[in-house]
Amino acid sequence: PTAVNHAGLNPISLAAKLGRRRVFNEIIGLSATEMWRYGDIACKLYPLTGVDTIGPNGHTDWDSAFMHIINGQTSEHLDMLDEGVIRQLLYEKWNKYVRKRFLQRLALTIAYLSIMTLAVYLRPQENWNVSSNSTGIVRVSLQVNGQNVVRYICEIVTVINSGLTIYFMINEIREQGFRAFTRTVYIVACFLITLVLPARLSVLFWSDNWQTMTLVEESLLILAIPCVWTYLLFFASGTNLYGTFVTLIYKMLSGDVLTFGIIYCVLSTCFGQAFYFLFRNIEQITIGSFQDVLTTVMTVFQMTHGEFKMSKGEFLIKYAEFSYTNYPLMSKCVFAIFMIIMPIMLLNMIIAMMNHTYSTVNARSQKESIAMWARIVGIVERSFNSQQLLAYRTGYTIPVPAKTASSGS
């Protein structure tokens, strides 16, 4: 059981990574030590080395069986989470130390969002006192009053919290890789909020460009605020009621929407270039739908959503524009092909893909909810230091509700 292959996996970890539930249970059973037995009731001791995410030195074991199971994508991995020692170990982690830290993070997140919201709504329309002297030198200063003092305090707390969030996750970024965290919009939002501080300070040092830097600051806030609020979905995924819903959103965005987006970009670029050349250098100056690249992209996007089918009269007026091109017949043929592929086939394809994803997730909603909950347990567990994890790991008691009682250490 302790043999390791060239990938650094022992038999337990390899069975967990491949989703071989039967082999995994056999190996776990062979590794167990029976402490006592009374009839059909037995107490067994399971070695957690190679199974638990907590390694012998207290650090995260990324090649452990538990880690491979919670990150698995097959139905076999879901079955392994819902039975045996893994499920019992999951409940032991949650009840012993993860739940308390999870609720603490939820309370801190609510407080952080409340402070950030207060800072946003207290923001005045004019954020600076702007004046200029006789030589034309522009001077910019902060507005100081009771409302702005409260806002400044809230903004300082928001920036500090964002910086601390990024700092404490440096170790996880080193271990998992930066690519895994680019999907976490909360980390991206914290990074954008920290960039607001140099944008704000630059206004005081470069007064001549205060309008440009104010635009940069507000643009960063506009992008960051929605991303911060989506972090609440992380806590919602830990409940049975919303866990499946959050899983469904993630699978649709990472699978269906991503696939649709790639296909849509290719086809829209193809037809956009065709329409751009068909409407180039025409004498009808009133037609501006394909005048430049940006207008062409927006027009193709509107046509995808059936802009030509709003009403019969509008459709006839828009359709008549194709007669002013240098190749009227070719323009109408390209338009017909476009309408068949983009609004009809492509949009219905994304609807069918999402419906298939919903049916798949809904069929195993209970197991998907447990899988999402297990990932949360793994994420929260990594916020503890190695000494704390070693102390929590010592003396795991894993009861089995059937005819066999077991414990792990």
Image (tube, rainbow, N blue to C red):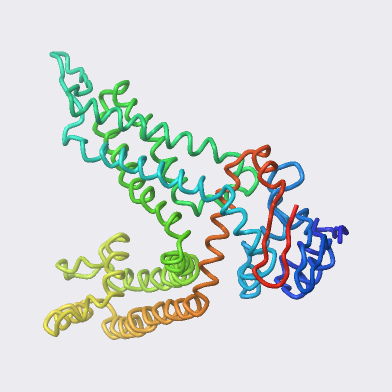
Residue 230, image x and y in percent? 38, 54
Q: Quadrant of residue 75?
A: bottom right
Name the quadrant of the N terminus: bottom right
Along the viewing direction, whichever of 309 and 167 lies nearer the viewer:
167
Question: Which residue lies at the image location 50% right of the left edge and 38% below the top edge?
Answer: 166
334 with respect to 234 (left or right): left
Q: Quadrant of residue 377?
A: bottom right
Question: Which residue lies at the image location 59% right of the left edge and 48% below the top edge?
Answer: 381
Residue 38, image x and y in percent? 79, 68
190 with respect to 286 (left or right): right
Q: Is residue 303 above or below residue 212?
A: below
213 with respect to 191 (left or right): left
Q: Quadrant of residue 175?
A: top right
Total numbered badges shown on the rendered structure: 0
385 with respect to 186 (left or right): right
Question: Which residue lies at the image location 21% right of the left edge and 79% below the top edge?
Answer: 308
Question: Which residue lies at the image location 51% right of the left edge and 67% below the top edge?
Answer: 369
Along the viewing direction, whichever of 30 and 12 lies nearer the viewer:
30
Residue 407, image x and y in percent? 73, 58
Q: Is residue 115 above or below residue 255?
A: above
Q: Is residue 260 above or below residue 129?
A: below
Residue 295, image x and y in percent? 27, 62
Along the viewing direction, whichever of 353 and 211 lies nearer the viewer:
353
Residue projecting furthest to the right: 3
Residue projecting furthest to the top: 134
Along the viewing direction, whichever of 272 and 349 lies nearer the viewer:
349
